[in-house]
Amino acid sequence: MIFLQLFWEFFKTGLFAVGGGLATLPFLYDMGERTGWFTAHQVADMLAVSESTPGPIGINMAVYTGYTSAGPLGSLCALVGIVTPSIIVIILVAAALRAFRDNKYVNGAFYGIRPASTGLIAAAGLTVAVGALLDTDAWTGWSRFWTVFNWKALALAAVIFAVSKVFKKLHPVFLILIGAVAGVVFRFAGV
Amino acid sequence: MRAYWELFITFFRMGAITFGGGYAMLPILQREVVDGKGWCTNEELTDYFAIGQCTPGIIAVNTATFIGFKQKGVAGGIVATYGLVAPSFLVIGLIAALLQNFADYAVVQNAFAGIRVAVTVLILNAVIKLLKSSVVDKLTACVFVAVAAAAWFSALSPVVFVLLAGALGIAVKVGKEAAGK
């Protein structure tokens, strides 16, 4: 019964992959090996599709895998499988937090956790920035360090940043749209 | 009923315009949920992200469940979560069915390279906003710098940083209170 099996495999992935979408990757490689639903090469393809479509990467991977293995119903089973553990765990945590909202230990913990969480987000943002603004393949050493900068991307980043500061009420989706259009017009991927 | 529909459609919209995972969703959450609907504060959003990083599952999904639960209990959590993932289901299903080489098209690759630049700027703006609500004194500034640097240079799990920072927060806050008495 492939539908139940898809649900179960993605339920396990949702339960054990801690730390976001990319944490599901090792589980997918393992799943492909055990079930024969897809190869490691297909996982790489799925990642490319997931990253170039809207939505959380882990969810996109589950839907794509489910579809290629067993059609629309398969993708629904994989989707429900991967989100169910999150829903259960978070509802338990949220209910506990609600009960202990005024507890001094909980408040103390979040006083320390908040800047740490912001630090983690900043580090993740830096990873995105390196991929988007630098051309790491062009690195030829410190004597010519500037070759690593992707000037086109840096210029676009400056423009988008300026737009976001001038038009503070602009919805983020328009900034994404500017990025997409500039990317196509100026061939940002070089293809 | 209307409240559930509003949860569903708000998260559906966010799912449809978030490219590149949980962190890219942060600025859109700030816009839609914090500024727009007033469903939670920037402070709470940082808390949700911290918890989302140490609990199983996808961070964006965890955050949706949190906000939905806060608004409308268990059913709200479920409705918000399925609203967030519904666009993925539709878009990916369509691509898997019709466009097997979707990611190979030049226009897709170029557009996405441009989108990544926009997302970089969006995350930068989001971090600046979060700094205002999370860095409130010298100690929290140190925690921010230390964790950002350590997370960048090491491969340690986010769970480690969140647990350590939580313990430090308890020690400082509860310790201060005990010393004050």
Image: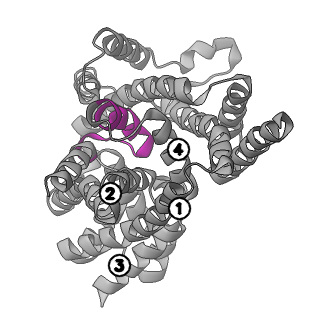
State which quadrant residue A41 falls in. Answer: bottom left
The residue that disc 1 covers is A96
Figure colour scheme: one colour
Q: In the figure, residue B165 lies in which quadrant? A: top right
Which residue is at a point 32% across and 36% down the rendered structure image?
B38
The numbered dot on residue A7 is 3
Q: Residue at x 58, y 40 (%)?
A: A117
Q: Which residue is mark 4?
A: B47
Q: In the image, A27: left or right of B175?
A: left
Residue shown at the point (68%, 23%) measured from the top left: B137
Sequence-wise, the earlier of marks 2 and 3 is: 3
Q: From the top left corner, tell me how far across and down residue B131 is, in percent.
A: 55, 26
Q: Secondary structure at mark 2?
A: helix
Q: Is residue A31 above or below residue B131?
A: below
Categorize mark 1 by other alpha carbons within 10 Å: few (<14), some (14-19), many (20+).
Answer: few
Residue A4 vertical placement versus B181 (above, below): below
Mark 2 vs mark 3, CA separation in Å: 15 Å
Which residues fall within the magenta stretch?
Answer: B15-35
Task: Say which of B49 and A60 sits in front.
Answer: B49
Q: Is residue B23 left or right of residue B31?
A: right
Q: Are marks 1 and 2 in contact (CB under 8 Å)?
A: no
Q: Which mark is residue A60?
A: 2
Q: CA distance from mark 3 to mark 1?
A: 28 Å
B170 up-or-down from B62: above or below: above
Specify whether B80 is left or right of B27.
left
Of the numbered discs 3 and 1, the one sitting upstream in the chain is 3
- Chain label for disc 2: A
Q: Residue at x 21, y 44 (%)?
A: B13
| Residue B11 inside the magenta-drawn segment | no
